[in-house]
Image (cartoon, helix red, strand yellow):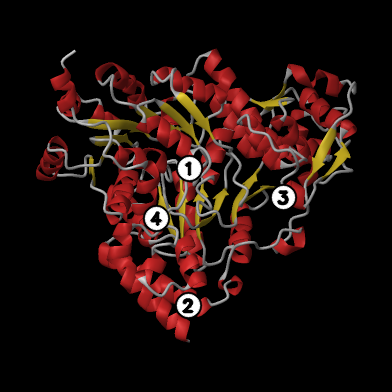
Amino acid sequence: MDFDLLATEPPTTTGRTPEEVLHKVFGYESFRPLQGEAVRELVNGGDVLVLMPTGGGKSLCYQVPALVRSGTAVVISPLIALMQDQVSALRELGVNAAFLNSTMDMMEARDTENALLTGELDLLYCAPERLIQPRTRALLQDCRLALFAIDEAHCVSQWGHDFRSDYLELSMLAREFPGVPRIALTATADERTRKEIAERLSLTEAKHFIGGFDRPNIQYRIAPKTSANRQLLDFIKSEHDGDSGIVYCMSRNKVDTVARQLQDKGFTALPYHAGLPAPERARNQERFLREDGVIVVATIAFGMGIDKPDVRFVAHLDLPKSLEAYYQETGRAGRDGKPSTAWMVYGLQDVIKLRQMLEGSQGNEHFKRVERQKLDAMLGLCEVTTCRRKVLLRYFGDHLEEPCGNCDTCLNPPKTWDGTVAVQKALSCVFRTGQRFGVTYLIDVLRGVENERIIRQGHNRVSTFGIGQDLSAAEWKTVFRQLVANGFLRADPEGFGSLQLTESCRPLLRGERKTELRLDPVQTKAAKRSGITRRRPTTENIADPAGWEALRARRKELADQQGVPPYVIFHDATLMEMLERKPQNLDELSTINGVGAAKLDKYGEAFLEVVRCISVR
């Protein structure tokens, strides 16, 4: 062994400890559960797979090691907006961070590459499609690299809701950079997806750090869809007026319509979908991040990696395709740990549409079988009569001992009724009319509506005509919804909207098993009438509302000067701690969580000035 050569090799670490970096740079006293273990494993050169809920502190798992290990950490991120947001936040902390993406001109990209080659950068963010280019790989071969961080790692899963084909190429990192530790991070992955991530990214030997999936501050609520836009408006008005939120819709047209309707009612609502011009999309996202009380109405193209901590609600006007998608999207609410709401309405047409899309897809039978299982799990969450959170967590392999007490089924337990006879009538009607008609027609037959179409088809003479007059049309709709949701009826895969019997309905049709159905609650306008009370934090809950607003105003002023979202300066939790403890000097301010050395130097006096004014009032 050449001992002289060994002595001249650069050290693996900078000499700083993870705890020192956490405190001095990020302003926190201690790691959260699993954070510290993941950080130390990566600092010591091990590969890591991290699964933590949104808002659980995944970013620190690679940002701290990036500043402890020598060299530049390369972070692979799927969205330009996300990498720009994180780079801005790191620069505010005094960290030398940069990104390489398609928004840069040639000169900007060249300057960033030079900074990388000369070792000036602590972290470099880039998209997977850029990383896998031969030129980028050759560039990285000439650099000292601290680690690779693969964010949103579930994008590698071909069964997932956010699949990105470029992620499949990232296994080359293990071959081409064998001495550089790697960390893959995600908030959404069941056991099958975790295994797929490890295999496709060549991380089968990586140590896994799996945090709980529970987000106890989020209240989960799902209601039958009656008049979706009116229901949404009532929900926002009664519970989240003035709050930031996200509304998800399936189609671009629906996004535009809902955004206009909310605007007409006085809300700051902005559309976001792939059909908008890129500058308008970017402008709407920027307003959402930087302004208070903005609602974004979007397709699922919006939101991955959004770091805005004070999103108080996420609403779905259409049914997501899977629990992974639902969990990922609802997880964008309440990243700051404050009470937030995940609200959704869904109906029979949602179920029919998704079933038709699935059966009509170009995937092979194995793909369709997996997708059916995912949709069935999503529908199971919608129709469950017990704690929703327990069902949601169980899907991801997590376990909740007791009902959560913070979902609609816990707060307002749904009633059930013996639907055995009604189910037999509904299934018989589908059979007697030839399995060629949709739900509206079937309900008319059951209720004995003798209209021209029914007479022309001769269905006023079938044995099921008029046998369902004991239930209203709305009640029959809930019966059919639950039959389709539970797989006893299926939508015509040809897309004509007719309902057809499945093999599993035979015991029900014969009356061989009792069928309990969920009784949909009567729709009321005010949330308080349904037993759900407003839970969001308001200035009424703050001892000194004027002081709180003064701190927020100073933060907004500084954020505008720096051209960053307010939460990049300080999170609400940091401002709240300032208000409660009222530090009088820089030393006292430095003990507030979230106040690192760079921010203390840059903003300390500006906030102390406000705190001192508050103290003497």
The type of residue carrying mark 1 is: Ser
Q: Between 230 and 144, which is closer to the camera in this rendering? A: 144
Image spot of residue 601 (x, y percent): 28, 64
Which of label 1 and label 4 is nearer to you? 4
Quickly name the residue at label 2: 547
- Give the quadrant of residue 380: top right
The type of residue carrying mark 2 is: Gly
Q: Is residue 438 visible?
A: yes
Q: Earlier in the sequence, mark 3 or mark 1?
A: 1
Q: Earlier in the sequence, mark 4 or mark 2?
A: 4
Quickly name the residue at label 1: 251
Quickly name the residue at label 4: 27
Q: Earlier in the sequence, mark 1 or mark 4?
A: 4
Other residues around mark 2 within 10 Å, as few (<14) / some (14–19) / many (≥20): many
Q: Earlier in the sequence, mark 3 or mark 2?
A: 3
- Give the quadrant of residue 591: bottom left
Quickly name the residue at label 3: 408
Image spot of residue 335 (x, y percent): 50, 51
Other residues around mark 1 within 10 Å, as few (<14) / some (14–19) / many (≥20): few
Q: CA distance from mark 2 to mark 1?
A: 43 Å
Q: Between 268 and 230, which is closer to the camera in this rendering? A: 268
Q: CA distance from mark 3 to mark 4?
A: 37 Å
